[in-house]
Amino acid sequence: MLSYKNHTEKISLLKEGKITLRENVSFFLERIQKYSHLNAYNFIFDDCLHQADLIGKKIKDGNAGKLAGIVVAIKDVLALKDRPLTCSSNILKNFQSIYTATAVQKLIDEDAIIIGKTNCDEFAMGSSNENSAFGAVLNPIDNSRVPGGSSGGSAVAVAAYLCDVSLGTDTGGSIRQPAAFCGIYGLKPTYGRISRFGLTAFASSFDTIGPFARSIEDIALVLSVISEYDEKDSTSQNIYAPDFSTNLNSNKKFKIGLPKEYFAEGLNEETRNAIFEKVEQLKKDGYEIIDIQLPHTEYSIATYYILTTAEASSNLARFDGARYGYRSKQSGNLIDMYVNSRSEGFGLEVKRRIMLGTYVLSAGYYDAYYRKAQKVRRLLKQDFDKAFEKVDIILTPTTPTTAFKIGEKSNDPLEMYLSDIYTTSANLAGIPGINIPIAKDKEGLPIGMQLMAKQFDEKILLEFGKYLEKNFN
Ligand code: GLN
């Protein structure tokens, strides 16, 4: 296995000449081959060894960037110039990107090595990574189980040591939930913290980009590099981004809130016990634990699925066979061409969402569904505002169960949607959240704890996350 725990240690080894970057990248490439059955990657980039040589030299010469030599995998919904961008969909199967996403460019500018693009649910719609035109991704801990989704490939690439860190996207839980199922760290930043330029839109007022890693340090490092105002994204916030890597060991006694709504019916017993065991320990360690209420929680899944499908139905209208992507070979007029291209190009779940979204936006139902859901979104946000008057951090389970079996929920969309029951609210409110791996269940499957904070308060999630990493791992 690797002889370093985080990027700082890796850089020391590289500087001392104990490893070379070429050996390190080859190590990952060999493992990607060996574990190809996990199906984590859609594409591997053949120039990464060449990059390793160039950046290895920069490290020796002392003029390398902050991420020098870190090996990164990126979810295949993020654009990288002259590389395929498929969103794991047949409709974009042969599409090459003509520009690079801002977040990815920032990594490259700091001398990261992009090793490939990871598998995901089609257009990031899913919770199990079974909705992919490239096939399902397997959980590395138990291959009969899902890795979570939609950023399943990005989570597996990190958990199975097929890269150092990865980027995923989180619209309703797609970073935190697969991180929980695979036993790693995964951070969904505040909406507006990281530019969405170059991220293929699913639900634009929910979508965020964030890192997966095996340590809090690496999460902090990547977050520091990719957080910056970007005029190319009109929702990017021009707000100060601290260096997230400093002072991680503050051991500050944050006030922790436990919302009772997140520990109600539906939560698996072992997960509940694991979380409460840690909470007890935190009390002993001198943390103030406060019971709080988020009374509108029960509406979060319904609200999320009304609003995100509405946005998706509009965003995905651009895939019509005319401009890019797949075009049906069937003959007919222009309308037939649109209909056939979309019918043949999109998978089932994507079609379900487009239809649902079109329905909630239709003239007769707009007020009853879309407008109402917007109002409930405001109420959910107000719940959090109130809670954060009393506490610094909200602590919950990340998922109601550990990783489920492949195929177990694929015929029951509602069951599948419920696996996001604890994660969608952070996206509805635009606040940051992180998964912290805290325990394993009887079968050895990882259990995750979710921490949420006020908008732009990622720093305290990382400081408290570091405390948990040090003491509970
Ligand atoms: N699983 C959720 C969904 O299917 C979340 C997806 C995401 O965060 N991209 O919509």
Image (tube, rainbow, N blue to C red):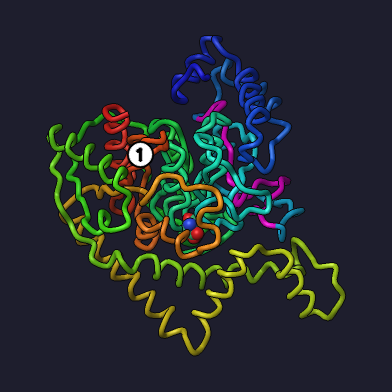
Q: Nearer the viewer, residue 234 or 364?
A: 364
Who's the residue at 61% across and 43% down the image? Answer: 118
Location of residue 238 (image quadrant): bottom left
- Look at the image and tell me in which quarter the C terminus lies: top left
- The stretch in magenta equals 67-89
Q: Residues within 10 Å of mark 1 (few under 14, many from 20)?
A: many
Query: Does the magenta stretch mainly form a helix, a strand or a loop?
Result: loop
Q: Position of residue 293 (x, y in %)?
A: 19, 60
Please tell me whether mark 1 sits on a helix, a strand or a loop: strand
Q: Position of residue 284 (x, y in %)?
A: 13, 33
Q: Position of residue 56 (x, y in %)?
A: 61, 20
Asked if residue 318 lies left or right of residue 249, the reply is right
Depicted 307 relative to depicted 396: above or below = below
Instruction: Note whether residue 207 is visible.
Output: no
Depicted 330 relative to depicted 90: above or below = below
Q: Position of residue 72 (x, y in %)?
A: 57, 35
Location of residue 331 (image quadrant): bottom right
Who's the residue at 79% across and 74% down the image? Answer: 337
Asked if residue 139 lies left or right of residue 185, the reply is right
Q: Type of residue at label 1?
A: Ile
Residue on which the image places disc 1: 436
Residue at the extreme right of the image, as rendered: 331
